[in-house]
Image (tube, rainbow, N blue to C red):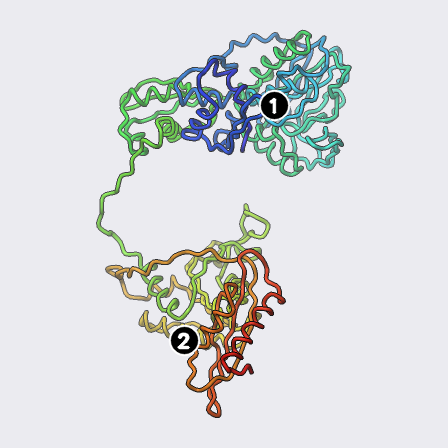
Amino acid sequence: MTTPTSYNWLKDYLGDSEISPTEVADLLGAHAFEIEDVKAVSGDTVIEVDILPNRSSDCLCHRGIARELASITGKPLANDPLKQELNLPTSDLISVEIEDPEACPRFTASLITGITVKESPAWLKERLQAIGQRSINNIVDATNYVMYAIGQPTHAYDADLFPQVDGQWKFMVRYAKVGEMVSLLAESGKSEDRDVEMKGSELLIVDNSSNTPIGLAGVKGGRFAGVHEGTTKVIIEAAHFHPTLTRKTARRLGIVIDASKRFENEPARELPSYAQAEIIKLIKDIAGGECEGVIDEYLIKSTPTKVTVSIKHTNALLGLELNSDEIEVILKKIGAEVTKIPDGFEVISPWERTDLNIEEDYIEEIGRLYGYDHIKSVMPDKVPLREINRRHYYSERIRKPLIALGFSEVITSSFRNKDTVQLQNALASDKTCLRSSLGKNLNEALDKNAGFTDLLGTMDTRIFEIGTVFDLKDGGGITEHVSLAIGVRVKPSGYSGKEDKILNEAILALEEVLETKLIAKPEKGVVEIDLTELVATLPEVDKYETVEKLEDIQYKSFSIYPAISRDIAMWVSEDTGETEVETVLNETAGDLRVRTTLFDVFVKDGRKSIAFRLVFQANDRTLTDAEVGKIMDGVYEAVAKNSWEVR
């Protein structure tokens, strides 16, 4: 996920650092993330940082990026809001009931009274505008600021519009009911609020006094008790919601916003209390008021994972020779607790780094912070060949005669829309099954490519594929084997019957090279052979054949625009060569001619009839009949000048 990062904002955490925006981008690019852009924005520099999925839990915010720079440079942050000592006042004015602690392991809420809702101060508006966010009012801006600052989404409610029962505001987090409606605030860039119907799998925040849904947990706040110009009391909610529930709800409803993106990447469960400390301080500064207290229901606490990191394993994976002291320094740079043990370390990550769970996670950290540019390529030692892969050997032997006969090898998808083996977790709606044969895929490939014969200068389309297919056994299990499928299409649409002759020639060529009889019957232009079964009957192999070095080929990009074909047949004298005629046609046709194919020659009454097919194509546009017609007029004139008679 690409996140815009303000250089001025970073300096709040880095302090009076001499590091420039360009150096920030270079360091992050070399050790952590890809940099999409660096641009000046009204007195600031915004760095577009592409955050990898494994770091989205802690680096989709300015503090996370600043902490990453501290790890890279080894210089501690001048100001780290996640290292402050928390001393939040408690309150019994708010309560929360949580139906499923797994879905919502932590829920915090604070009450701030005596505030004034107004326009945000200039510095806050500038910060948000620099990263592309619109200023709304000081309270809403404060919630956005904290999210972009430390990565924890929050939501503000007007406490006076939120009903109290016995002097207490009551929240509840529960699953939605099927058919239940939730009224949501308008999304960014849209003017109207929307009502959405629940399927029963969503997590809701509700007013527990009336069981009224007031928001989609982790996705979008509701219209319920929205902050307005007359608001004087606010309840600030900061919680931790299950990432998978959040993602599924956001994707189903098409509400993929900055808050839901952060929740679905599972920021640390310790973060809500720090967000409360930050937003209370910010609101008191820009809107006045006092905090009456905070409730904190922390039902399932996260426990730090102690991981053993081996010096030997680290160097083996990275191809380095780092010593104990060097590794220890790097591990401490990321803020980890490091304890030396024989041959390595016991390491506990900082609580915000939820991505560090196994030894390889830490080895990756060591490698990137040390610098991948320090890792040198090492040529592996030569080892004797231990085993001959018979399928590979015979596949190569099969390819040679087929290619010699004008066949091209194709690779088609292993997935199909309908077939016998159904996937439990399909990649897409048209990829719900595994293929049970190659034939259907080959026919589809022939259909798509049969129209290119003129462009390729062939009379037909010939392809083959070697690939794995899947089917169900009688007992219900899945069996798989490798198949060879060969296909021919003589005309652009459908089977003509002429294909079988070409296929039989191909089968004879394979029988000759494999020295065995093949049981293969063409069916409508395609023949398929169980290659696994065939290879099992062929002789054992003790060595691979010598690979012949082919001529170097220079790749040339092809046109994506359609080609146009024109035929021309003419009478010439019997002693006129086909090459002579073709040269005249090509010179006259010009640069738009991409191929000339001789397709008919015969002699009658002392004269020779020659027929050519000219193919025209442009690299930048679709040619029109008028353009090609004008070129062909010139070709006819050239033919007449040479005293050849167009038929």
Q: Is residue 526 visible?
A: no
What x and y, as percent, mark residue 421? 52, 54
Name the residue beneath numbered marker 2.
505
What x and y, as percent, mark residue 302? 50, 21
Q: Nearer the viewer, residue 60 or 250?
A: 60
Name the residue beneath numbered marker 1.
153
Q: In which quadrant is the N terminus drawn?
A: top right
The answer to which quarter of the image holds residue 200 is: top right
Q: In the image, is 229 to the left or to the right of 323?
A: right
Q: In the image, is 426 to the left or to the right of 535?
A: right
**Which residue corresponds to the image point at 75% horizontal and 31% vertical from the top-left?**
191
Q: Nearer the viewer, residue 202 or 412?
A: 412
Q: Are marks 2 and 1 in contact (CB under 8 Å)?
A: no
**Which residue corresponds to the image point at 48% horizontal and 84% vertical from the top-left?**
572
Q: In the image, is 423 to the left or to the right of 124?
A: left
- Secondary structure at badge 1 equals loop
